[in-house]
Amino acid sequence: MPVVQENLIPQEREPVPVSATDVVRVFGPASLSNLGPGFDTLGLCLEGVGDVIEARRVETPGIHIVLNEHPFSAGITLDPDKNTAGVAARMVAAQLGYTGGLELRIQKGFKPGSGIGSSAASAVGAAYATGELLSPGMSKHELVDAVLGGEALASGARHGDNVLPALFGGLMLVSSSDPNQYRNIEIPAGLWIVAILPEVQVLTREARAMLPVQVPMQHAVNQASSLAFMIEAFRAGDWAEVGQRMMEDQLAEPVRSTLVPCYSQIKAAAMAAGAFGCALTGSGPAMFAISDKHAEAQSVMLAMQEASLATGIASSAYLSRVNEGRRPKWRCS
Ligand code: HSE
């Protein structure tokens, strides 16, 4: 299995745990962001795909990151000041006045840079595990600044549409001008989500830089209208309308879809297979589609992957329910 050896902390420099039992292990979930017309404002938490993060106190001062030996970890820095998990954990530790050593063991559960919130999953997992380790029962609301700080490192902006769904679960509405303002939108059960990750590289920083500085007034008005209708459709569980509205983004997707050579083919295949809608997620290249039936969602997933492959682009894909954020943390003690 290919592993970037230089990314692993050499054995002799591994910090020594103060107490082998003083460990908190949590799941940092993947998430969909920019849901349709919800650029920077609407995100949803996925189930079953994400990172597992362990935090423990160690004698060696500072933050120490250890990554699992897996291709998903390749290229991820162990420098805590350049790693989203390290930045988020450091902020939580500082908030709590902890000056001792901290080790973060990260098992990457999916590919970074794919569009379903890899940096957010690590930042949220690290912040939550650190909070639980140093101040058990700490409110998730107290972790918001830290997870936004981790995200800002990765993408260059404090946008909350990945980190907040990953932290709280469910569907989250976040203010784009002040991501400390957010709320959960309750939605009925029944939604199936297909997320496909074509093997195309899109860097969030670059995908943000390519967005227009100004847009036509009519596009802005249309966007606001589509977002409002989509949120109402989510609340009502009207998945057909959610699907229709999620394809009405006029701000980001028209520009960013040009970065994904198989975009039109995947979208057409998803719709032909019966999806209610299909759109880019995050800054791409990931795309998602929705359905209300498991078997249909499976067919949609297969059709999307086949369409991608037909253009010469391999992909991985996930089929998920909405993660309501109720997964218990695992505390090892
Ligand atoms: N809202 C973010 C963006 C999500 O589109 O840049 C990607 O991290």
Image (cartoon, grey):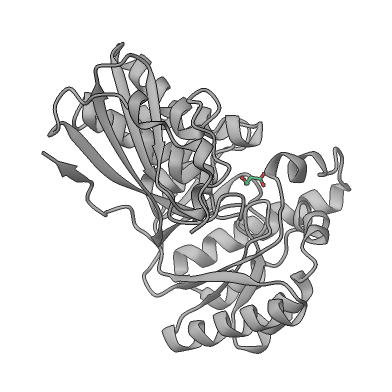
Residue in the image at 59% along x and 37% along y? 159
User: Which picture quadrant has residue 206?
Assistant: top right
Residue 169's spot in the image, x, y percent? 38, 51
Residue in the image at 27% along x and 54% along y? 326
Instruction: State how many labels appear.
Output: 0
In this picture, residue 163 sits left or right of residue 217:
left
In this picture, residue 196 sits left or right of residue 11:
right
Residue in the image at 77% along x and 78% along y? 311
Task: Please say if 91 is above or below 314.
Answer: above
* Viewer-closest of 104 and 317: 104
Residue in the image at 60% along x and 35% along y? 154
In this picture, residue 175 sits left or right of residue 292:
right
Task: Please say if 222 is above or below 136.
Answer: below
Pick the quarter of the image with the C terminus: top left
Q: Is residue 230 visible?
A: yes
Figure quarter occupied by ligand 1: top right
User: Which picture quadrant has residue 308?
Assistant: bottom right
Residue 310's spot in the image, x, y percent? 74, 82
Task: Please say if 33 is above or below 311.
Answer: above
* Viewer-closest of 9 and 291: 9
* Viewer-closest of 100 and 210: 100
Residue 201's spot in the image, x, y percent? 71, 54
Q: Residue furthest front?
A: 12
* Viewer-closest of 7 and 201: 7
Residue 222's spot in the image, x, y percent? 76, 57
Q: Is residue 180 visible?
A: no
